[in-house]
């Protein structure tokens, strides 16, 4: 394991990201010290490297990553993991609004609470929220899955088109085009495989308590259900 | 975009809140380069009838003397200070005494009639510092680093709908009741629906800036007996648009966020300090905590001492 540290204290996000991209070619693990909630950390990193952000990150942490595996030891601001395509983003603390916005693939994991509009317009991939997820989580979701182990706030799955949201806690209210269905055995099996891998160790009985939010229609705005393609 | 921040020391004692707020705003500098401002509460130490006037004056012979003559009609000038600013302006500050708070706004309006003069604010329990440019330049110009107080609010401005100058820098103040100030990130889209009833009640608007509208709205509600928390809760129901704003009063600070949560706001507290800001990077300047709360859509938070 080849490991190196970057001290972010006196560097701009651009300088940090430039260093990351260069060092990622040579090292397996890069630790960013003193991140101090700076924005855009690890943006656009497309190398299969492990990055540990030793503190909090600001907006757009890990945006557009592909293959990289990023762990944020503190909190993340708005839009963490935005538009990522492959890889992993683990946030040990809480996340702001729009975590996992528009992702095409990969896993985004928030150990504590997330703000509003979690997984907005996501196309694929998985988002796990260990605590509560805020207002309009899953808005305009087009694929993939969101798993919320706490409560989900008002208008959950607002205008959801594809994909599913699994909620262990309370669903405050559903958004337009969202409905709740029972989870099936395949859902349970998938959750049982996935959650312990991220140290979410639930009692077996809890897996029966998940509710699943799915779209009512695949074409809620542009035509009758008979036209669904 | 704009950055907003607030900090309160829970023990009600004087602390270096000027330094705290300078660091919090510098951390938010990327959110707005146009101007920055502070309301630093609790450190002025004025007598009950004393006020501090903060006046922008164009550097031109005779104007400062005209201002002083006008002030002296209603009050002796008990102390004064001139702070050089930029673009051929100075900031003239003077301590005055008035028989009642109700004399303050008419005096300000009279001074404003002098060409080349704008009263930035008049206060009793807080010091307002606001100017164009970067936080650290303003901090150096006004020595915000040395200011003591119990609590403070502040702003970095990215202007969108109104002019960039000292007066339009935040905080904005209302004179409906003493010493209410607001900093704001966002837009109030039903601005005229909010402004119109306030004007019908006789409240005077000096600008078309929506932050001025918020501060009058807040002061009006407080004058009617609403608590700060009730005021902010009602504002979230009444005001449309994307916004989060922070209010400073002689007793504390509060934050309100629009019902769709379209502008950021985070908070953190420990046994000593309550702090709110647009981003965690700002909170970290006054607190070492891993637990940062997101202000939810439509939520308000208040801390009063």
Image (tube, coloured by chain):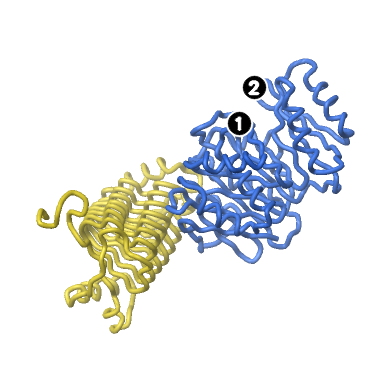
Colour seen for chain B: blue
Q: Quadrant of the N terminus of chain A?
A: bottom left
Q: Position of residue A163 (x, y in %)?
A: 22, 61
What residue is drawn where x is 42% and y is 52%? B260
Q: Quadrant of the C terminus of chain A?
A: bottom left
Residue A60 in view in this figure:
yes
What residue is drawn where x is 37% and y is 51%? A79
Q: Are marks 1 and 2 on the same chain?
A: yes
- The numbered disc on residue B132 is 1
CB contact under 8 Å: marks 1 and 2: yes
Nearer to the camera, A167 or A94: A167
**Residue A75, image quadrant:** bottom left
- Horizontally, is B188 left or right of B151 in the view? left
- Horizontally, is A199 left or right of B260 in the view? left
- Horizontally, is B221 left or right of B238 in the view? right
Q: Position of residue A5 (x, y in %)?
A: 41, 53
Nearer to the camera, B283 or A178: A178
Dot 1: element: strand
Q: Identify the subunit bearing mark 1.
A: B
**Residue B71, image quadrant:** top right
Dot 2: element: loop
**Residue A181, image quadrant:** bottom left
Counting residues from the start of the chain, the first of labels 1 and 2 encountered is: 2
Q: Which chain is yellow?
A: A
| Neighbours of disc 1 within 10 Å: few (<14), some (14-19), many (20+) | many
Q: Position of residue B209 (x, y in %)?
A: 56, 35
Mark 2, residue position: B87
Nearer to the camera, B156 or B281: B156
In the depicted structure, whether residue B109 falls above or below residue B39: above
In the depicted structure, whether residue B31 falls above or below residue A157: above
Q: Identify the subunit bearing mark 2.
A: B
């Amino acid at each position: 394991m080849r490991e190196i540290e970057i001290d972010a204290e006196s560097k701009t996000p651009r300088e940090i990201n430039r260093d990351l991209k260069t060092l990622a070619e040579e090292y397996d693990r890069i630790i960013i010290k003193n991140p101090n909630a700076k924005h855009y950390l690890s943006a656009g990193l497309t190398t299969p490297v492990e990055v540990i952000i030793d503190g909090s990150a600001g907006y757009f942490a890990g945006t557009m990553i592909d293959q990289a595996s990023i762990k944020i030891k503190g909190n993340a601001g708005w839009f963490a993991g935005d538009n990522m395509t492959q890889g992993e983003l683990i946030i040990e603390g809480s996340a702001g609004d729009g975590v996992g916005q528009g992702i095409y693939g990969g896993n985004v994991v928030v150990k504590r609470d997330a703000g509003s509009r979690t997984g907005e317009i996501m196309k694929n991939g998985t988002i796990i929220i260990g605590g509560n997820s805020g207002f309009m989580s899953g808005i305009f979701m087009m694929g993939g899955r969101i798993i919320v182990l706490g409560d989900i706030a008002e208008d959950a799955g607002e205008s959801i088109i594809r994909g599913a949201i699994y909620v262990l806690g309370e669903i405050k209210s559903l958004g337009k085009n969202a409905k709740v269905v029972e989870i099936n055995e395949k859902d349970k099996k998938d959750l049982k495989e996935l959650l312990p891998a991220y140290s979410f160790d639930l009692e077996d009985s809890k897996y029966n308590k998940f509710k699943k939010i799915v779209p009512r229609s695949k074409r809620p705005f542009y035509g009758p259900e008979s036209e669904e393609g | 975009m704009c950055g907003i921040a607030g900090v309160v020391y829970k023990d009600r004692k004087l602390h270096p809140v000027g330094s705290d707020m300078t660091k919090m705003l510098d951390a938010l500098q990327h959110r707005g380069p146009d101007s920055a401002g502070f309301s630093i509460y609790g450190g002025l130490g004025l007598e009950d009838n004393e006020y501090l006037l903060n006046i922008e004056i164009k550097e031109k012979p005779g104007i400062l003397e005209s201002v002083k003559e006008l002030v002296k009609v209603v009050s002796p000038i008990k102390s004064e200070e001139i702070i050089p600013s930029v673009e051929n302006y100075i900031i003239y500050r003077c301590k005055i005494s008035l028989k009642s708070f109700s004399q303050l706004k008419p005096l300000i309006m009279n001074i404003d009639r002098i060409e080349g003069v704008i009263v930035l604010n008049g206060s009793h329990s807080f010091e307002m510092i606001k100017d164009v440019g970067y936080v650290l330049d303003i901090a150096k110009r006004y020595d915000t680093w040395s200011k003591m107080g119990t609590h403070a609010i502040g702003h970095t401005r990215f202007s969108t709908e109104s002019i960039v100058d000292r007066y339009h820098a935040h905080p904005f103040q209302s004179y409906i009741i003493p010493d209410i100030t607001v900093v704001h990130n966002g837009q109030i889209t039903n601005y005229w629906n909010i402004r119109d009833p306030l004007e019908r009640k006789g409240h005077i608007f000096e600008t078309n800036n929506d932050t001025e509208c918020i501060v009058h709205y807040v002061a009006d509600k407080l004058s009617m007996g609403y608590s700060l928390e009730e005021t902010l809760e009602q504002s979230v129901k009444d005001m449309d648009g994307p916004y989060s704003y922070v209010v400073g009063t002689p007793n504390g600070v509060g934050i309100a966020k629009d019902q769709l949560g379209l502008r950021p706001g985070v908070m953190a507290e420990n046994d000593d300090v309550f702090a709110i800001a647009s981003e965690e990077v700002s909170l970290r300047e006054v607190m070492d905590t891993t637990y940062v709360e997101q202000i939810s859509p439509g939520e308000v938070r208040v801390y009063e001492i």
